[in-house]
Image (cartoon, rainbow, N blue to C red):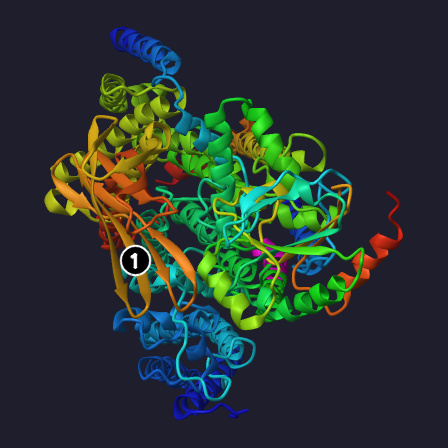
Amino acid sequence: MFASAGISGTVGRAFLLVGFIGAVFGAFAAFTGARRNDQQIIRLIPRFSTLSFAAAVGAFAAMEYAMITRDFSLAYVQKVGSWSTPALYNFAAVWSALEGSILMWVLVLAGYTAAVSFWVRKRMQDLIASWALGVMFVVSAFFFLVSFFPANPFAAGAPGVLDGPGPNPLLQNHILVMFHPPILYLGYVGVTVPFAFAIAALITGRVGEGWLVATRRWSLFAWGFLTFGIALGSWWSYEVLGWSGVWAWDPVENASLLPWITGTAYIHSVLVQERRGMLRVWNISLLVATFSLTILGTFLTRSGVLNSVHAFSESSIGSWFLALFAVVLVVSIGLIGWRGDKLRSPGVIDSPLSREAAFLANNVLFAVFAFVVLLGTVFPLIIEALQNRQIAVGAPFFDKLSMPIGLALLTLMAIAPVLPWRKASTETLRERLFWPAWCGVAALVASLLLGAYGLAPLLTFTLGGVSAGAALRQVVLATRRQGWRGLVGRANGGMIVHLGVILIAVALGASNSFSKSQELSLVANVEANFSGHTFELKDVVEVRDDRSISVKALVLVDGKKIYAPAITKYTRIGMNVGTPSVRTSLTTDIYLTLEPPVRQDANEARIKVFIKPMIIWLWIGTALMAVGTVLAAFPGRRRKPTDATSAPVEVAAS
Amino acid sequence: MKTRKSVWLAMFLLVAVLLVFGATRTGGPQTQQDRIDSLTAVLACPTCSGESVFVSRAAAAESIRAEVARQVSAGLRTDEQILSYIEQRFGGEVLLVPRATGVDALVWALPVAALVFSIFLLYSAFTKWRGNKPESPTSQDEQIVARALNTKSDEQ
Amino acid sequence: MKSNNLVKIVSTIVGIVIAMFFVVLVVADPDQDIVARSPLLGQPAPAVTSETIDGAQFVLERRKGSWVVLNFFNSTCVPCINEHDLLVDFANSEASNLNGAEIYTIINDDSSDAVRDFFNKNGGDWQKVKDDNGAIAVAFGVARVPETWIIDPNGMVRLRITGELSPGLLSEQVNKLRDGFTS
């Protein structure tokens, strides 16, 4: 079991074993304590969660130590380590391949378990907490086991190896590799927490609103990081991959998007449960779906069943995740079926013109969206299994189907913030939407004046304008009533998140429809023109270091600054990577790539120029979403604690 | 209020007119690069999974891009012919848009079916909820209440 | 209660869909056949005109009258390196045959120098053909290396082998085709 060479290997595996034992004992303590309502046993839980977390930190530290000291006795370091990789990228190399990623998952999950354990430490009389922690320990134990057996990062490598190829070249030329995976994992793994509480609620039969409110911030936290992680991934794709886009509907991207879609649906429909006590089964199903989709996504991308930009080599790990997926679904569906009677709620939604109804419509749209993404991702698999032929389902399919869904969601975003709970009259709607509607008209006129065309983008801009107006109206009213407190809380923070989403939708609409590109054959010191910009090749230079040979074309753009798109050959791996060079402004990005073949001695270069409108608004929108999420996590205006949960909050006459 | 209603009507008309105007407008003729990009966007890179030739930086994708660029600048073939040229070389799996016939059509049909089904579910849920209005009291109930109130006031 | 039945029905349906999903996933097989399909089988080989790394002209059509084996190759691809010795053996055995097959390497996404170095170190003196913008690869529909193609003396494509060759496979296939061949 410990037949791994090197001190890091043995230490690391020992830590993993300790962590696994801690998780197993923790699960035992949690489940037995909860079943017998025995506080003595329950009191042991924090010890096991701390032990497990400490062990996970130890294992991760051992891995980093091995990577930093270039301990080539480990097979994993032989795979992704190298003396010629710069320190920062070498640190990040730990999570650049399968085994290290699983190790990071172990660390984040153990961290969440310890954090939840700490958070509920004063409320352990409530058995829901113990059941939830039990679930988290079980999942944690699974990942420790995976890291011990099929995805063992501490396995001994071939003897006598003195250097390695380093991580995939795509993962060692941009600093985002330090941030995107950890942040994404904080979100991806974080959905385990609301899932665990959902299972605990089903087991105890206490499926009312209490646990929902309690775990609200955990759900929001995980969702926020998942959103930010996905956005960072898009930014990385834009800056590094060289095709000038932000989203390719790649299976790995889809795997991260699917739990985000169901998570967003949950964030909205949980409000209906809090207010009206309805949709309990649906909300629990959403949480189960969100967690299951993280496991399914991991299965699809790690098993080699599909291939993509990030996918790593095949390994038996696929069957492990498939098994976990099966167990999660069987247990969850079984529990939901068993507790079906308790989940029924007496509430009704009175009117299709109400905020509850808008949230229902929102959920329908998100559910269909998730279905579309899942279907498109696994359809090639299904066809291959049924008919033994290979087909591809890619961006054209997803783009075509997500466009109407996106427009419908924008429409809902315009109407829902002005809809009151319970019932609304069309007069109320007309009055409240008056100024937002004019915002929409203004947006349409402005975009037409700027030269926009095409029904889909114009609709996007119009609806975006109306939604922005509706969201701003809400925020303005709230700040007028309460000052700065009008910016915090679920509703107001949510409006700011909506503003971010609208910016992203508008920016995507603009850049997808109105980007222009052209290949230019540049000769040194001769100016070329495209789309109102000038490009002049100044020089073609070669830069060598111990891991790569880079050929850069120095291009003067608009006579102002020199941009250097490059093609880099990573000598150790024999892989060529193109690096784009981007000039960003508030209105357009000018994106340059160098096209092969290129010769360093020649005085010419072929570049491809992309003129992409409004790209920076994608990142501004993301920042706004992040700010809004933080604001939404703060407590907002509180209802009187003695009011029923479904009592309306006083709304000042507007 | 009538004034408001007519303002809304005017607004909708304005938006409709502007949308029609904008939808029928174009951004200029399609350049050769546009044509190459739109063709490569519907071709699947043979060594990737679902990425288009336009997106992928793999060697096979580069070769196909070069081939498409060659054929577009030669100007001899239509879009359909260029696509079928590539398809004939690499086999049917190179087309990124699933066909609308046979089993492949399921990928288009199922989402529509899902949408229709969920709208139907929503509709039946709303009808059920509408029907769940609390019963109004019968005349018998009202008599009981009236008697009870009378008794009470008598006692006082 | 009606709603409880609904939950049970929905759970069963979801359960069945997921079970079917499982069957699909479990059956999903990332492996591939070694002798592969191609729309070009039985068709005339695409016209190939290019240069070898020594500067000589290479025109596939002029090779009509002999059996031609094309091997798509990249000096950093591990299966290509692994099968190289098998190709050298094959070339040697064919050289002594009157009706022997001619073998050519088509370079895939690699520099001529790297290929030249590799062959200098590992043997193999047949012609290596350049394919700078991947036109030959696209013409044959070759996306991954190694691939080995067999073309008969009439210029028709007869066989396509994807992936690393196993010992004796190439000779066996060429002999089978040769025996069955009537011009």
Left or right, A2 with respect to C13, comes to left
Residue A337 drawn in magenta: yes
The reply to whether residue A459 is visible in this rendering is: yes
Please name the residue shown 26% across and 9% down the image: B7
The image shows residue A525 at horizontal and vertical percentages of 18, 37
The image shows residue A9 at horizontal and vertical percentages of 43, 88
Q: Magenta segment, principal secondary structure?
A: helix
Q: Nearer the viewer, residue B88 or A119?
A: B88
Left or right, C27 with respect to A150, comes to right
Which amino acid, by three-letter code, is at mark 1? Ser
Whether residue C136 is situated above or below residue A351 in the rendered picture: below
Whether residue A653 is situated above or below residue A393 in the rendered picture: above
Q: Circle 1 sits in a helix, a strand or a loop, which is it? A: strand
Q: Quadrant of residue A18?
A: bottom left
Please name the residue shown 38% across and 17% down the image: B29
Mark 1 highlights which residue?
A: A550
The image shows residue A29 at horizontal and vertical percentages of 48, 83
Quadrant containing the N terminus of chain A in the rendered view: bottom right
Name the subunit of mark 1: A
Left or right, A586 with respect to A51, comes to left
Please name the residue shown 57% across and 35% down the image: B97
Magenta residue span: A333-342
Q: Classify mark 1: residues with Cα within 10 Å, few (<14), some (14-19) or many (20+).
A: many
